[in-house]
Image: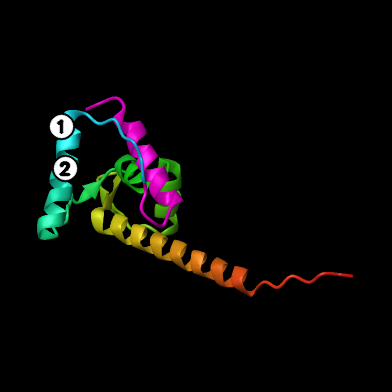
Amino acid sequence: MSSVLPDDIEALRDALQGSPDDVTVTLSLSRRSAEKVLELLEAEHSTGAVVMPLKDLFTSTEAASMLGMSRPTLMKLVDSGEIDHVRVGTHRRIPMRAIAEYQRSRNSSHQETLKAAEEFRSNITFHRST
């Protein structure tokens, strides 16, 4: 795996969080990673394929990375019950379902916040004192 890849992932994540519309980013990928991205885009375009991870349970570090947050932040969400988990021995694992549910919830909250902010902005009237 390319040493540049984690920076590219972060750049892509930042671009996606910064814009509700199309994003433009420049990435430096290994040839194998670029081939995987191309396969994914071609499969989605031709068949509507959806990529699912091969495993269902993720470590807290893996789940935090997938959600774009720190592990301590993820663990606070797990402890508060916002993100479901299962115990495997003494360790906590995060099911893919819980990760996807949290992402959907977070995206929905962001959309609602943006809508409320837009409504607020459109209702603001400025008064001039004379």
Quadrant in the picture for residue 121: bottom right
Identify the residue shown where x is 44% and y is 42%: 72
In terms of depth relative to the viewer, which is nearer, 34 or 102?
A: 34
Q: 30 or 53: which is nearer to us?
A: 30
In this view of the protein, can residue 2 be seen by the observer?
A: yes
Q: Earlier in the sequence, mark 1 or mark 2?
A: 1
Pinpoint residue 127: horizontal percent, then vertical percent: 78, 72
- Residue drawn at point x = 33 percent, y = 40 percent: 61
Image point 67% across, 71% down: which residue? Answer: 124
Q: Main secondary structure of the magenta part?
A: helix
Q: Compare residues 21 and 74 and report the one nearer the observer.
A: 21
Left or right for 32, reference 95 = left
Query: Which quadrant of the figure has residue 70?
Result: top left
Residue farthest along the top direction in this orientation: 3
Q: From the viewer's perspective, is residue 71 above or below residue 45? A: above
* Residue that carries the numbered disc 1 in the rendered image: 32
Closest to the camera, between mark 1 and mark 2, is 2
Quarter placement of the C terminus = bottom right
* For residue 96, side relative to residue 124 (left or right): left
Image: 18 above or below 106: above
Left or right for 9, reference 111: left
Residue farthest front in this picture: 130
How many C-alpha atoms fall within 10 Å of the one at disc 2: few (<14), some, or many (≥20)? few
User: Marks 1 and 2: CB-CB under 8 Å?
Assistant: no
| Span highlighted in magenta in the image | 1-23
Query: What percent of the width, then of the height, locates residue 82?
Result: 41, 60
Image spot of residue 32 (x, y percent): 15, 32
Q: Which mark is residue 119?
A: none
Disc sitting over residue 38 in the figure = 2
Amino acid residing under circle 1:
Arg
Residue placed farthest to the left in the image? 47
Mark 2 secondary-structure assignment: helix
